[in-house]
Image (cartoon, rainbow, N blue to C red):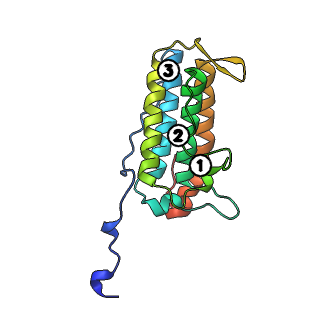
Amino acid sequence: MSSSDSFDPRDRQIVIPAKDERADPPYLQGERVMLESFLEWHRETLAFKCAGLDAAELRERSAPPSTLSLLGLVRHLADVERYWFRVVLDGQDAPAHFWTEHSPDGDFDDVDTADAEASVSTWRQEVALARELAGARTLDDTGTRRGEQVPLRWIYLHMIEEYARHNGHADLLRERIDGATGE
């Protein structure tokens, strides 16, 4: 291999810039501001855990037989955002982006050839749509899941729980990739 063929780390295509954009949730605010702030903090924590990595690093699996990867988490949470805000809250017929009936864990399993930039873009688009749909409703407004009414307040709480759990996974995945730690 000639020196011109050698790998230069500057050639890495970073998917999410290495920048912490999180804002601490406020202590003294109303319920809605607190719920939205905690959800935003967790959304940005996922982005922060993925920041500064290239597509190959985002695809790295935790440990066999697990298919867990940072890219899988991004894809999973894009579909979670889609489901709870577009399908449940807004009643849209919005098919999943990354899983199918034949590949129910496709969000996690099918990352080896997935376009990392497109996956992150899809996640960011779903977050933007979720903000828009939720912003037009009160915490007591409901959507429907499996024939039952689900208030936006419950959806916010569930989303905070969902991100918190998966951000714990992201902590471990990121540490395995490059040793980076932190909340």
From this view, report whether residue 57 is shown above or below residue 91: below
* C-alpha span from label 1 to label 3: 24 Å
Q: For mark 2, what is the residue? A: 78
Instruction: Please tell me which of labels 2 and 3 falls first in the chain.
Output: 2
Q: For mark 1, what is the residue? A: 107
Q: For mark 3, what is the residue? A: 134
Mark 1 closeness class: few <14, some 14–19, many ≥20 residues within 10 Å:
many
Q: Are marks 1 and 3 in contact (CB under 8 Å)?
A: no
Instruction: Please tell me which of labels 1 and 3 falls first in the chain.
Output: 1
Identified at 53% across, 40% down, the residue is: 78
Q: Position of residue 7 (x, y in %)?
A: 35, 76
From this view, report whether residue 46 is shown above or below residue 89: below
* C-alpha span from label 2 to label 3: 16 Å
Q: Are marks 1 and 2 in contact (CB under 8 Å)?
A: yes
Q: Identify the amino acid type marked 2.
A: Ala
* C-alpha span from label 1 to label 2: 9 Å
